[in-house]
Image: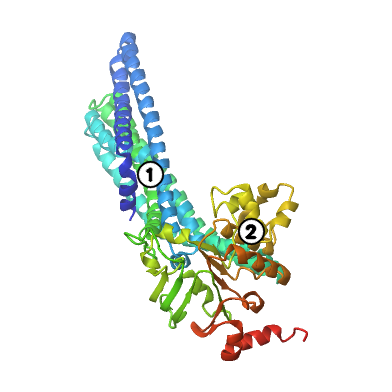
Amino acid sequence: MLVRILRRFLTPYKREIAIVVVLQAIGTIAALSLPSLNADIIDNGVVRGDTDYILQVGAVMLLVSLVQVASTVTAVYFGARTAMAFGRDVRSAVFHRVVSFSSREMARFGAPSLLTRNTNDVQQVQMLVLTTFTMLIAAPIMMVGGVFMALREDVGLSWLVAVAVIALAAIIAFLLSHMVPGFRSMQKKLDTVNKVLREQIGGIRVVRAFVREPIETERFAEANTDLTNVSINVGRWMAAIFPAVMLVMNISSVAVLWFGGLRIDAGAMQIGSLTAFLSYLMQILMAVMMSTFMLMLLPRASVSADRIGEVLETETSVIPPRDGVTALVGHSTVEFEAVGFRYPGASHPVLNDITFAAREGQTTAIIGSTGAGKTTLVNLIPRLFDATEGRVLVDGVDVRDIDSHTLWNKIGLVPQKVYLFTGTIASNLRYGKPDATEDEMWSALEIAQARDFVEAMPEGLDAPISQGGTNVSGGQRQRLAIARALIRQPEIYLFDDSFSALDVATDARLRHALTDVTRDATVIIVAQRVATIMDADQIVVVENGDIVGLGTHDELLEACEAYAEIVDSQFAAAPS
């Protein structure tokens, strides 16, 4: 998976990668030539006392050093830019894939895991790319070139190079074999920490209301301790790598000086060649060490790439039509024809044989007990899910055959869980209509019974809204969400239990104000409160995924026992 991700997202940067490779090669070749020049100065300049020769070769060394520095700096610049662009592209691809997911895929991965995959996991792979461009490209060139140059200086000591490289490689392989499982476990533990933390932050009011702070603190501490223990275990193995590398390098240096001194004493080697050989051995081992650092990142990046690839290769269960209908001719009628819905792996369907029609100029209400399938039923219209049986039609066309933008442009949805975005009241209203004027926004707020509290705010339409709308009350959030749907003037209104946080008086005023606005639209309301829907043109009573009643309020009181029980339960305490 790692190779596929690298190939896919680095292909557009072939030119930059080629520049990095060429510059790294130039810089490495320049670095490899310096020890040889230094040996030349010692053997032919210092030993003979030839100052002019020392200055001439020294000037060449200075020039070579400048070439090395310039090439390396430029290569790192292009490598860093390419790595950052790679990370940006991967994050963008993951984001767009997640945005295309239906509620089914979102539930499968979970928000905490998706956040980790699009941040920490992408960062791990991005770090691998950056390290490759800045270090790994130079490492093999330096290793091969170092071996060649070392043999050029003295073949008799070449066995030391082989012993040092094999010993270092064996030690690194042993340490990495213990690190890979730890890296895989770390990412899962990080998911768990994010999940627990997100739940606790989102449910802080519930935690405090039930005095569960000690329990939740212990729960987070347990998840945090698990991550810490795994990280410490991996860190121990990582900490052993560099001392091991330094041990091999120091022992190798001593061995070169010892055996090289014997060869010099025997007249088989010059002093300059010994210093050059020692420098080349250090460069070879440094190349191995750089590869080691790369291999330290590789296991974790590989795990992260698998997690990223899992998201990128997951297809949404709500597949957009290839040649979707873009022009609907009709009166915004919504029809359900023998619709059924079953979650994957579920033993029982959520909806079964749902058949009814909601027509233009009519208000259709859906009521039933908790868990009856009301929200799922409404979510089939904008294709948050797709029906597993039957068809959902808009203007006589199956919603699966309608272009997604065309379908959504006809719908104004107020979801059960109201969400406002960070910004202002105006920016949230313009989610419904980007070019909405102030007059249009005030009009929508007035219909939604939100004008009074917005006008009471010093900033008015520019009043700030925090993430999720936590700085306004639940009733105010609902009214702002209703105004957001009203401002786009859709042909189909879907109110999914959107009046639950409103008091009875505000609910009545809002429904009365909606009458004129929605006169020519199709309105579908999901509600728990009978008072909210008793004036609807038709009421659909849903129980256990089946329609058990369909008609007006008066008709259902006589013909539908389930509806009569709901009415009795809500009005039993009312004064006669």
Could you tell which of marks 2 and 1 lies nearer the N-terminus? Answer: 1
177 relative position to 268: left or right: right
Q: Is residue 288 above or below residue 306?
A: above
In percent of the image, x 68 and y 83: which residue is there? 570
**x and y, in percent, of residue 490 in the image:** 52, 60
> What amino acid does circle 1 point to?
Val
Q: Is residue 485 above or below residue 549?
A: above
Which residue is under mark 2? 480
**x and y, in percent, of residue 143 in the image:** 29, 38
Q: Which quarter of the picture shows residue 288?
A: top left
Q: Which quarter of the picture shows residue 152?
A: top left
**x and y, in percent, of residue 192 in the image:** 52, 63
264 relative position to 555: left or right: left
Q: Tags 2 and 1 in contact by the CB under 8 Å rule?
A: no
Q: Categorize mark 1 by other alpha carbons within 10 Å: few (<14), some (14-19), many (20+).
A: many
Which quadrant: the C terminus? bottom right
- Mark seen at residue 129: 1
Circle count: 2
Q: Is residue 247 above or below residue 282?
A: below
Q: Which quarter of the picture shows residue 265?
A: top left
Looking at the rendered image, the disc whose residue lies closer to the viewer, 2 or 1, is 2
Looking at the image, can residue 405 be seen? yes
452 relative position to 552: left or right: right
> What amino acid does circle 2 point to?
Leu
Closer-to-camera residue (86/425): 425
Q: Under tag 2, what secondary structure? A: helix
Label 2 vs label 1: CA separation?
Answer: 45 Å
Q: Under tag 1, what secondary structure? A: helix
